[in-house]
Image (cartoon, rainbow, N blue to C red):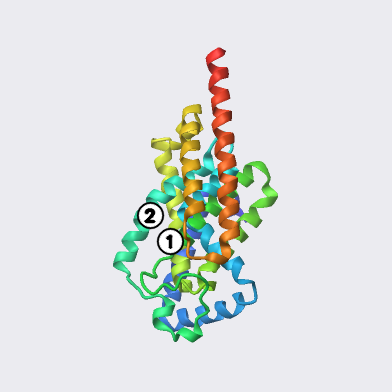
Amino acid sequence: MPWRRTATPQARLAALAAVLLVAGLVVSNRSLNTSAFMTLQRLTALAPAPFWAAGSVLGLGLCAALLAALVADERMAPVATILWSLLIGGLALQLVKSIWALPRPLAVLPPESVNVIGLRLRAWSMPSGHAAMLAALACALAREARRRRRSLVPLVWLLGALGCIARVAVGAHWPADVLVGASIGLLSVIAGDLLDARWSLRRWLSSPVGRRVFAVVQLIAAIFLLAMDTGYPSALAVQWLLGIASIVSAVARWRHAKRERFRTAVG
């Protein structure tokens, strides 16, 4: 298509965010939202509960940042994207939640009709913060995959979409919440790119000092994740796997940055 050949990646990302936002606003109609929720709950019940619980856990901002760190090389691009999204998306999510205070499915529907996995949440439904972080993470990882191995890009976006759907599967959000949340996540990536062009967090993180500082932060975050109660016990194995892998990654990042600084000093 001519548009796909001429549009910039950011323009395509903005178009996707706009489509998700409009879809979320349309689906937010009470009857349509309920119908879509019940349909998705029936379909997702075919997959094991730990799968959807894991998707919800990985949508936590802490987990998204640690996942980005695991795939980041010396350029640290995915980490910068997620950190900007945490800041910008976090502020946008809180603003929308305070304006659009909607009850969650469990507070509206008969309890026996909702399949709940993990936390039994009832308030502050719109929008989904987990969906926002998963959309931002999918974008960050897709960019990295496009640079290293383009064949993985569709898989990254598919896993990101399944992670967003997990918020409906666990009974925590309406479909409209997920669509609007994902839109905010993508928009936060675009805003983060604009801010990074002026105050380059990416450049600082890719320096030896920046990588060592982030290695310490990554180590502390990983230990905190291991001790954290996410509210999804069936995803404990994924939580521990990510925490342990992040500790190993933090130690490796520190050593590599330290060796690079030593070579620079000697040279």
Question: Relative to 84, is 210 above or below?
Answer: above
Disc 1 residue type (three-letter)? Gly
- Residue 5 pos. (x, y %): 60, 50
Name the amino acid type tagged 2: Gly
Q: Is residue 94 visible?
A: yes
Q: Does dot 1 land on a helix, a strand or a loop?
A: helix
How crowded pointer 2 is (Cα within 10 Å; few <14, some 14-19, many 20+) is rated as some
- Whether tag 1 and tag 2 are in contact, CB under 8 A, the answer is yes
In the image, is residue 262 above or below residue 7?
above
Mark toward the start of the polypeptide (1 vs 2): 2
Residue 102 placement (x, y as % from top left) = 35, 74
* Residue located farthest toward the top when viewing the structure as drawn: 267
Residue occupying the point 55% across, 19% down: 262
Residue at the farthest front position: 227
- What residue is disc 1 on? 129
Horizontally, is 69 left or right of 149 in the view?
left
In which quadrant will I find the C terminus? top right
Position of the N terminus by quadrant:
bottom right
Expressed as whole percent of the image width and height from the top left, the position of residue 52 reads 57, 67
The residue shown at (67%, 51%) is: 152
Q: Which residue is mark 2?
A: 90
Front residue of 153/6: it is: 153
What secondary structure is marked by label 2? Answer: helix
Q: Is residue 62 left or right of residue 122?
A: right
